[in-house]
Each structure stands twice: as C-alpha cells, then as structure tokens.
Amino acid sequence: MIGSIKNCMVWLSMQPDGMYEVKPYHEKRSLNANSYFYVLQNKLAQVLKTSNDELHERLIKRYSTVTIITVPDTYDIKGFIKYYDIYNKGEIKGNSVIQYKVYKPSHEMNTKEFSRLLDGLISECKEMEIETKTPNELLQLEGYEI
C-alpha cells in the first residue's frame, strides 16, 4: 500500500491482525538511468583496461554513501558486506575490534544517491574524453546518426 498517512491508516485498520512494515516511500530509479550507467561504465573500463567489476567497486568507493561499523576482530564480514575497507583497529573494553568503512551498493541506492554515482562516472568519462551524451541527446543533435 502506498499513500498518505491517513489512507495507510485506513487501509491498515481493515487488515487482519499481523505484522506490517511501514516505511517512507521513495521513487525507484529508472531503468534508463541504470542502463546509461552500465553503458558508460563499460566504455570507461575498456579505456582503463580494467574489468567492469573492478571499476564498479572503485566507483562505489568514490561516490557511494559510507557508514562506519565496529565489529570484533574475530568476525569475518566477507560474504555479508560486499564493499568495504578497514578504517581503524583498536580495543573497546579490552576486546579487539575493527572499524570498517561500508559502502552502499548501487542496487540499494535511492535516486539521489544513484545520481551522485552516475555524475561521478560521467565526470570520469569526460576526463578520458569518452562521449557521455545519452542516445536521446545524440538524436537531438542535428545530423548525428547512431
């Protein structure tokens, strides 16, 4: 159910007893933005002579939202968190801990966060003199053929 607080409350009052999750609504990213991102990423990876996966991780670490987490140094976060760097090592109350910078993966980003990632990629493409216009922008240019 997506709606105003009042509409959601009415809808919830008509539901059977049970557990329900309520969270703010965020518009989903367009598939066009995703497609555009991956086309540009592929072009940049080719120019840099690197894999798409390696480049994607670099872009995430440059432009994604970062959270710092602290875990016991005996805990292995591999398999639970995809993009991270060790931030600090230390002790809390006599226990050894590691602090990690955790980067939000692109598939979890909202429109604003993904826009920042895409803007960073566009900037890096322009530095390498890679065409960054979308197919629609290219069609609007007089005499340009795809």
Image: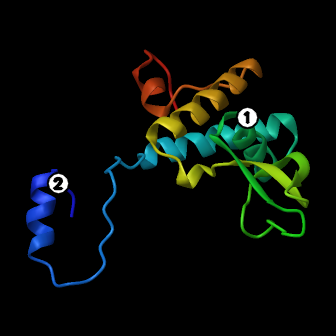
Q: Which mark is residue 53?
A: none
Q: Residue 62 location in percent, x, y?
A: 73, 34
- Which of the 4 quarters of the picture holds residue 76? bottom right
Residue name at image x 15 percent, y 70 percent:
12
Give, as a three-letter code, the residue at label 1: Arg
Q: Is residue 60 visible?
A: yes
Residue name at image x 79 percent, y 50 percent:
100
- In the image, is residue 140 above or below residue 56? above
Q: Judging from the image, what secondary structure is the residue with disc 1 in?
A: helix
For the residue pair 120 and 134, the one nearer the viewer reads as 120
Q: Residue 134 location in percent, x, y?
A: 50, 31
Residue where numbered disc 2 is placed: 3
- Label 1–label 2 contact, CB within 8 A: no
Residue name at image x 16 percent, y 84 percent:
16
For the residue pair 141 and 143, the one nearer the viewer reads as 141
Q: Residue 142 location in percent, x, y?
A: 43, 15
Q: Which mark is residue 62?
A: 1
Residue ranking furthest to the front: 93
